[in-house]
Amino acid sequence: MTTAHSTTLAEQIRARAREIFPEVVSLRRDIHAHPELSYEEVRTTALVKEYLLALGITPEPSLLETGVVALIRGEGRSNRGELVALRADIDALPLTEENSHGFCSLEAGKMHACGHDMHTAMLLGAAKILSGMRGELNGDVLLIFQPAEEKAPGGAKPLLDGGLFRRFKPLAIIGQHCFPNVPTGSVALCKGSFMAAADELYCTVTGQGGHASAPHKAADPVLASAHIITAVQHLVSRVTPPHEPAVISIASIHGGNAPNVIPRQVTMSGTMRTMNEDVRFLLQEKLRQTVTHVAEGLGVKAELEIRKGYPVLYNDPVVTEQARVACTEYLGSDKVLQSEPIMTAEDFAYYLQEVPGSFWQIGTGVAEQDKSNTLHSPTFNPEEGALETGSGLLAYTAIRFLCWE
């Protein structure tokens, strides 16, 4: 693709994205008002299917009970039979919305507090743009509307286990996520390890209950739990290499219900985040040893369950550089930012274990950002101008990847 052609193409897509922006906003607001939790996205699935069918895009046979996979077949004269995949997640969070706009969640205890309504609407917008530009597609575009990103084991792995990439073999996969700390109209990319592996920790400490006035006659699980919490913190500072990011946080502790009773049992839960699979394995082993030995030393028993979560999300350096070029052509160099690695997790990582790809941050922030406007917050309220940016950028990137020399 020549520079002149890419410039003209970008202008065409930007104009089309502006034209359909009100429609994409309506889609987003509809989805936002009717959030559905992981594996329950029946209405959202039906909405996506109906919209795609109206564009002349027939959804593929379902691999899971919810979610949609569909193929846009290119009609470009240089069609080399290649395929690029675009992914959006469709599920909401178990959270009660506290915003006051006119399209708040109508479902008690459910909210799109992570931007998946935005992601879904942007991919639908990209589908509309691409369906009208099949002649520019020198290959095919796979649309993945994925369920259950928010609940381990997530929807990506079951899709892959069900044969998604055995049937379709993308040369690259692209995804994006709303971030309120990135200005609307901009994107931020990161090569290599971008998001952390996330493991859930569940610990049960069992001792001997008794009267709080006579602790010597009991085996105190509360005291032991406090020592365990303190002890595991040394794993990050004294076991993990200083150049390797890692986090261990005990986020909940429950035990006892009276001020004068030493309980028999205490339960704790937390999370472990790592950016390196070797470090992840090392910390899992050291964590088990630490919990067991501290408990034994204090005369109680501790059982630790580590539920392995999503792997490290690794952005392929070559694909990410190509994505940076495409984003720069579409947005301008001042709108393409460098992202630092972050310790949140994403099941998009499973796709990247199968094919090269890139997952970037799309900005939903404004200059005077409200501090409560954060991901997973009941007051999360992304700037809807990002819908225009994201729809056009996904469409342009797909076309650009299919004509890369």
Image (tube, rainbow, N blue to C red):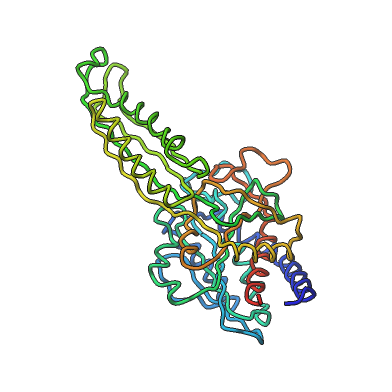
Number of labels in the image equals 0
Residue at 66%, 52% in the rendered image: 338
Which sits in the foreground, 361 or 291?
291
Q: Quadrant of the N terminus?
A: bottom right
Residue at 32%, 18% in the rendered image: 259
303 relative to 394, above or below: above
Q: Quadrant of the C terminus?
A: bottom right
Residue at 50%, 56% in the rendered image: 313
Q: Is residue 13 left or right of residue 101?
A: right
Residue 193 picture location, percent across and down:
53, 54
Residue 281 picture location, percent across and down:
38, 49
Residue 303 picture location, percent across and down:
27, 38
Residue farthest toward the bottom in the current orientation of the protein? 77
Residue 271 picture location, percent across and down:
42, 42
Q: Is residue 369 left or right of residue 149?
A: right
Q: Is residue 203 left or right of residue 246?
A: left
